Image: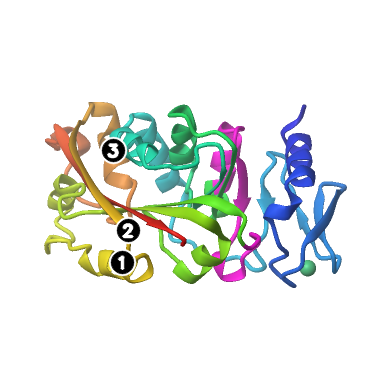
Amino acid sequence: MKKIEKSAQFLESNRMLFQCPVCGKGFTQVNNNQFICESNHSFDLSKKGSIHFLLKQPHNDYDTDMLKYRRIVAQDELWHPMLAEVSKYITNQSGVHLDVGCGEGSHLHHLQALGLKGTSIGFDISKDAIQLAAALYTDVFWSVADLAQSPFATASYDTIFNILSPSNYSEFDRLLKKGGQVIKVIPSENYLIEIRELTGKNLIPYSNQDVIEKFYEHYPNAIRTSVSYKHEVKASIVQPLLNMTPLSWNSKQSLEEIQLEEVSIDMDILIGNKG
Ligand SMILES: [Zn+2]
């Protein structure tokens, strides 16, 4: 079956997980590869099977090269130990999962490799990111969307993954089923510190304290755990590592001269439940 047909079928069977981002009503059908709401607003499926829910094109901070570099680094398993830790805390592995700001899709794909089943939807505001995700990972439904004009239905999700991406807690509350969980992953003090030292940027010690406090305001019974490790840097991922973040590598120093044997991954994982 073609990707677009598979996605049309997915939307037919999972209509209740979505709401129209224009009028907030439910979707009634898929017709000619368009997802159509009760008021007749329609959204196109792409050939690769993703859907486009954005009403206007956003300003985009992530260019395609940056996304490709992130994928190379993800496939080099940079974030795998962190994701293994995330996986331990998922209470309903067979539920309905939403990855908020999924980027090029590698995190959600790897969580599936670690045992995540059920229904997985990943979305990002970047169309380029979703194209990359949909081209490679066919076991997730991918969409271009913005939580400020949410296409996702109320009280429909068991798990929200919020990995290195912005939060919208009132929207998370609306989306979660009773007892559902938000799993948020944020950088901690020494996250990629070797790269910050090389670029000479952001050398002020990084603190995630404000983000943690805000999370506890919304989820007073939250659990917090940390994950820290070193990742060995092969020559082939030096350039991707240096170019995958907006820190932007523009030094005159050639790649061959750079000494980067390992990088630190240092993160906090916050788990909150909707009571
Ligand atoms: Zn509508």
Q: CA distance from mark 2 to mark 1?
A: 6 Å
Q: Specify whether 94 is left or right of 5.
A: left
Q: Which residues are magenta?
A: 130-154
Q: On screen, 82 above or below 179?
A: above
Amino acid type for the residue under numbered disc 3: Gln
Sequence order check: which comes first, mark 3 or mark 1?
A: 1
> How far apart in space, not on screen, are marks 2 and 3 (Cα)?
37 Å
Quadrant containing the N terminus is top right
From the top left corner, tell me how far across and down residue 18 is, in percent: 69, 57
Judging from the image, what secondary structure is the residue with disc 1 in? helix
Residue denoted by label 1: 216
Instruction: Pinpoint residue 87: horizontal percent, then vertical percent.
Output: 39, 37
**Where on the picture, by quarter, is residue 36?**
bottom right
Kindly identify which numbered label has been placed on residue 110.
none
Residue type beneath disc 2: Ala
Q: Are marks 3 and 1 in contact (CB under 8 Å)?
A: no
**What residue is at 72 percent from the left and 70 percent from the top?**
24
Residue 77 showing in the rendered view: yes
Residues marked 2 and 1 touching at CB (< 8 Å)? yes
The residue depicted at 46 percent of the width and 67 percent of the height is: 168
User: For residue 138: magenta?
Assistant: yes
Disc 3: which residue? 239
* Towards the viewer: 65 or 52: 52
Badge 2 crowding class, 10 Å Cα cut-off, few under 14, some 14 to 19, many 20 or more, is some
